[in-house]
Image (cartoon, grey):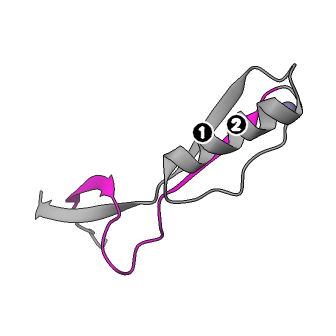
Amino acid sequence: MTRTTYRFREQTLNPHTGEDAERTLFAMECKGCGESSDGTEWGEDGSAWAVEHLKANPGHLTYREHITRSYRFEAGAWL
Ligand SMILES: [Zn+2]
């Protein structure tokens, strides 16, 4: 009979930053019609898009912000 031993390692989930990380993107979605901004690295762009969208669609008063941020597990100590 063979016995197998497993070792486990702590992992910590952190926002993935650095040159190889995907950019964090902010986009704004109109809850009235589902239309959304393109998504940029600056949250203010989504707010500006919502203002313009409201001007064109006066009844569209509610919005949802979508933030896309990548995360990565970092290896820690062996247990
Ligand atoms: Zn709308």
Range shown magenta: 7-31
As drawn, the label of residue 47 is: 1
**For this rendering, which residue is in front, 67 or 5?**
67
Identify which residue is drawn at 72% across, 50% down.
Answer: 37
Q: Is residue 19 above or below residue 53?
A: below
Q: Is residue 67 above or below residue 76?
A: above
Judged from the image, the secondary structure of the residue bearing numbered disc 2 is: helix
Figure quadrant of residue 3? bottom left
Q: Is residue 43 visible?
A: yes
Figure quadrant of residue 4? bottom left
Q: Position of residue 31 (x, y in %)?
A: 79, 27
Q: Quadrant of the N terminus?
A: bottom left
Give the residue type at disc 1.
Answer: Ser
Identify which residue is drawn at 15% across, 62% down.
Answer: 76
**For this rendering, which residue is in front, 54 or 70?**
54
Q: Position of residue 17 (x, y in %)?
A: 32, 67
Q: Is residue 75 above or below residue 62?
A: below
- Structural crowding at the residue carrying mark 2, measured as other residues with C-alpha within 10 Å and reported as few (<14), some (14–19) or many (≥20): many
Q: Is residue 56 left or right of residue 54?
A: right
Q: Is residue 6 visible?
A: no
Q: Position of residue 79 (x, y in %)?
A: 12, 57
Judged from the image, the secondary structure of the residue bearing numbered disc 1 is: helix
Q: How many labels, in total?
A: 2
Q: Are marks 1 and 2 in contact (CB under 8 Å)?
A: yes
What residue does disc 2 label? 50
Label 1 CB, ligand 1: below 8 Å?
A: no
Label 2 CB, ligand 1: below 8 Å?
A: no
Q: Is residue 29 magenta?
A: yes
Identify which residue is drawn at 70% across, 28% down.
Answer: 63
Q: CA distance from mark 1 to mark 2?
A: 5 Å
